[in-house]
Image: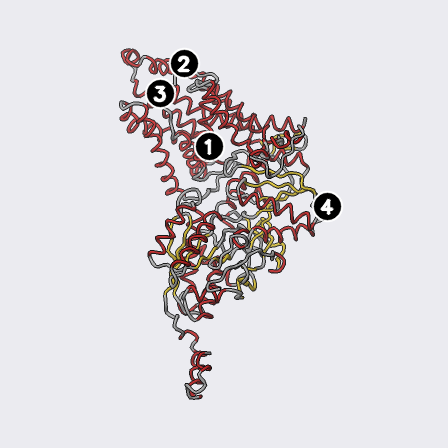
Amino acid sequence: MEFFTTSLLNGISYGLLLFMLSSGLTLIFSMMGVLNFAHASFYMLGAYFAYTTTLFVGFWPSLLVAPLLTGAVGALFERWCLRRVHRFGHVAELLITFGLSFVILELVQLTWGRSAVDYRVPAALDGPLFTLYGTQFPIYRAFMMGIALLMLVSVWLLLSRTRIGLVIQGALTHPEMVEALGHNVPRVFMGVFGGGAALAGLAGVIGGNAYVTEPTMAGAVGPIIFVVVVVGGMGSLAGAFVASLLIGLVQTFAVALDQSALGALQSAGVAVTPETFGYPLLKLKISQVAPILPYLLLVLMLIFRPKGLMGTREG
Amino acid sequence: MDAMKKPFGLPFFTLTAAAVLSLHAGLAHAQAGETVKIAWIDPLSGPFASLGANQLKSFQFMAERVSGKKNPAGVTFEVVGFDNKASPQESLNVLKAAIDQGFRYVTQGNGSGAAAAIIDAVAKHNERNPGKEIVFLNHSAVDPDLTNSKCNYWHFRFDADTSMKMEAMTTYIKDQPSIKKVYLINQNYAHGQQVSKFAKETLARKRPDVQIVGDDLTPLGQVKDFSPYVAKIKQSGADTVITGNWSQDLTLLIKAAKDAGLDVNFYTYYAAVIGTPTAIGAAGEGKVKMIAYSHHNIPGDIAVVGEEFNKKFKEDFFTTDIYNIFTMLPAAMAKAKSTDPVKVAAAMEGLTVKGFNGDITMRASDHQMQQGLYLSTWRKVDAKNKYNVEGTGYTFVPDKFYEPYVSSTPTSCQMKRPGA
């Protein structure tokens, strides 16, 4: 019971972090149809911006400033680069964001160096929130969960309950009509891309000090957020939320399982020795493969349900 | 000695004079004044770029420091960096380039896979190109196989291998009766698997009462959130964790443990590698222990090197066996009275010099450096241990020094010597 509760909490909080990372990506994809390969780079940029601004204004203002800066970078990129290649179709858009990810990586290394920076959790949020069966639950994790939920609710409200949201959704399907009504559609797209980048930046502000702020951080989260978006369903915010939690829980609980195919065979009375064909594969424990389960899920999902859990958009 | 074999060749007077002269002018040998170029083959791009860049600077800093009259051979050292992108294949490409450019000494260390590839390529090259032999100075690749089943005459390892560090670590653990349950968590590749294997073997021998309550292997660099593993460690009731993890796999583990309030000690291999101390910070205070040939507060010349290096580059000098390389190599050249790799390799066999960590000997049977190891703990800087690691306010404080014989492990190497 003790282990189950701790793991459940860990799984949910990890899932919420994944959601925080992928919400901006899924937002941009659902609204603009652009699969932003540089999304994880904006996450990294947010962390580095937060590290620098924290030195000057402290953590709390950084929580606002760093995402705004990241959003501005995103908006400028959309205005001057993405918009120009838009007419060449999705492949060109994909490639330019792919290129951007390398540019950001190099710029970050030139500016802040190649090794980790000392970006710390603020003292007010450092320490345990409560202790459950002798295991502490850190305040910062709860803070991360809170921000992720806040992000979910506010993005959803913005898109479905406000005028801006209506214009954004309209601009997606009927750009000419929205333009005829007097709205500046390109600027709407710029805003969406900037907003998506800002969400990634916010995740960076929070993830950067919870984990480690270093140039490899973008590469480390890049693959997993694509899994979330694909499993959840391309462009579905709710889908991304469900997929994040699912992946968080699966991965967390799989770590606890030390069973292997070898053990199963042996208990079934089959003699397995190190000479048996495929022995190295058979002796793999579930806990050992836990971190790659999400990718397995990705492959299975694409085979059996290509549109994802809650996908609406055609691939 | 050659002169002595010709009994009537030289008048007695001349012979004595020559002997006296050569004694007094130790620098007057043929090799003095020569330039020895060392090709450094390690990553300068990719995830390990910061580590590689620091080590290249360390090499060049030490080369400059000992060059000329400051080393017994009186030679000038020059180190040129070649980026192998951490890949064995790319290592071979740049090794070829280095050989074409006339380098006769190569050094590498990050990754035993790349090291094995270089050993193999150097051996083949030396066999096919007599008179153009290359010597490989391995500064950090610690796979025990490199001095056992894959051992080669042209390869010299200055680091202590995985099994040696485990010997010293478990000797320390043997004297800690409070350790009862050990959890092993390692990266799922050659190095991590070996740490796990040697930990189990040596603990069973030295502390059979200690229980191994967990043995996890995680994919290299894939785990973002270590809290599930921390929950598992807690569940197992472990009081000690042994891990060969490095970089983010180490820092994220320690951070997650601190967040969960897990009260265990971490016995690590690589807590001092660039960036790791910054990331560990306060989370590891008193809990992170390291087994290595070095720590940051060794007095003497190495402390001066550390300070000068830090002043010049604002980084730590942590791959300190580079200091030992630049002690042993010139000593061997002075002994061989030559910079010819063939003669220097022969001179290095069994050679003992004074390293920063005591007397160090290059064991002739397998070319594995026999050296003292330190077990140290991550603690706040104090008056006695004042080196501020990466500006964190923390440092590695030595608990125990182990003489070379403690960590010495037997070798199965059947070395094939040239001409034999």
Looking at numbered disc 3 in the image, what kind of residue is underneath it?
A: Met
| Disc number lying in front (2 or 3) | 3
Secondary-structure class at tag 1: helix
Q: Quadrant of the C terminus of chain A?
A: top left
On the rendered structure, is A120 left or right of B338? right
Mark pair 3, 4: CA separation: 63 Å
Mark pair 2, 3: CA separation: 18 Å
The residue beneath circle 4 is: B209
Looking at numbered disc 2 in the image, what kind of residue is underneath it?
A: Thr
Q: Chain of mark 2?
A: A
Is there one chain holding both mark 2 and mark 4? no
Residue A236 appears anywhere in the view: no
A35 relative to B372, above or below: above
Looking at numbered disc 1 in the image, what kind of residue is underneath it?
A: Val
Query: How many neighbours does mark 3 have within 10 angstroms: few (below 14), some (14-19), or many (20 or more)?
Result: many
Is there one chain holding both mark 2 and mark 3? yes
Q: Chain of mark 1?
A: A
Label 2 or label 1, whichever comes before in sequence order: 2
Residue B242 point in image, percent of width and height? 61, 44
B312 or B141: which is nearer to us?
B141
Q: Chain of mark 4?
A: B
Label 1 or label 3, whichever comes before in sequence order: 3
Marks 2 and 4 close (CB-CB < 8 Å):
no
Marks 2 and 1 close (CB-CB < 8 Å):
no
Is there one chain holding both mark 3 and mark 4? no
Is there one chain holding both mark 4 and mark 1? no
* Residue depicted at x 42% and y 56%: B106
Label 2 or label 3, whichever comes before in sequence order: 3
Mark pair 1, 3: CA separation: 22 Å
| Disc number lying in front (4 or 1) | 4
The residue beneath circle 3 is: A32
Mark pair 2, 4: CA separation: 67 Å
